[in-house]
Image (tube, rainbow, N blue to C red):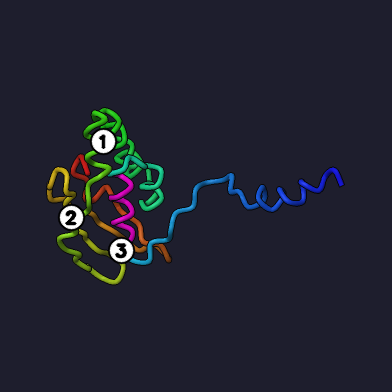
Amino acid sequence: MKYRWLYILLPFVLSCNTGEPSFPKAENALDAGREFIDACLKGDFNKAGHYMIDDSENKGLLKRIGNDYQKKSSREKKEFNDASININDVQEINDSTSIISYKNSYDNIARKLKVIKRKEDWLVDFKYTFSGNL
């Protein structure tokens, strides 16, 4: 009787995920690109990395923009966080490669992002479109 609370609490404890955070699967190139861009604008580079091809060059570039982001003022971080993504064009090169042209509403700089389908996952190949900032 005195351990009855354990049976009530146990399902909640077991449902907690202590591993990596789960992010929604990108269903297409646009989903992957939007999730990646949004995560970068919000300073969530762990999430951005989830939507990026996992290689040393891409990781290095993401780390670089993460370091640059951390150097920004809190006001500028807030502006990026609050910015919306404006997709100008999605160019489908073939069934597994797309180029997304976009701007964010804060700095309004035109940028491009290459997204590739690898197996069943759409992922950003940052090294082909890196411009030094998002």
For image coordinates 30% across by 30% down, the residue present is 70
- Residue at the extreme bottom: 95
The reply, left or right, for residue 122 in relation to residue 68 is right
Residue wearing tag 2: 102
Task: List x then y, in percent, for residue 15.
Answer: 63, 52
126 or 87: nearer the viewer: 87
Q: Quadrant of residue 93?
A: bottom left
**Amino acid on which the number 1 mark rests in the picture:** Lys
**Region in magenta:** 31-40
Which tag, 2 or 3, sits closer to the chain's start?
3
- Asked if 75 appears above or below 19 in the picture, the reply is above
Q: Are marks 3 and 1 in contact (CB under 8 Å)?
A: no
Label 2 near label 1: C-beta < 8 Å?
no
- 65 or 5: nearer the viewer: 5
Left or right: where 42 falls relative to 85: right
Figure check: 118 above or below 7? below
Q: Nearer the viewer, mark 3 or mark 1?
A: 1
Residue at label 3? 29
- Tell whether label 3 touches label 2 (CB within 8 Å): no
Which circle marks residue 77 in the picture? Answer: 1
Lower position in the chain sequence, tag 1 or tag 2: 1
Q: Residue 84 appears at what percent x and percent y?
A: 22, 51
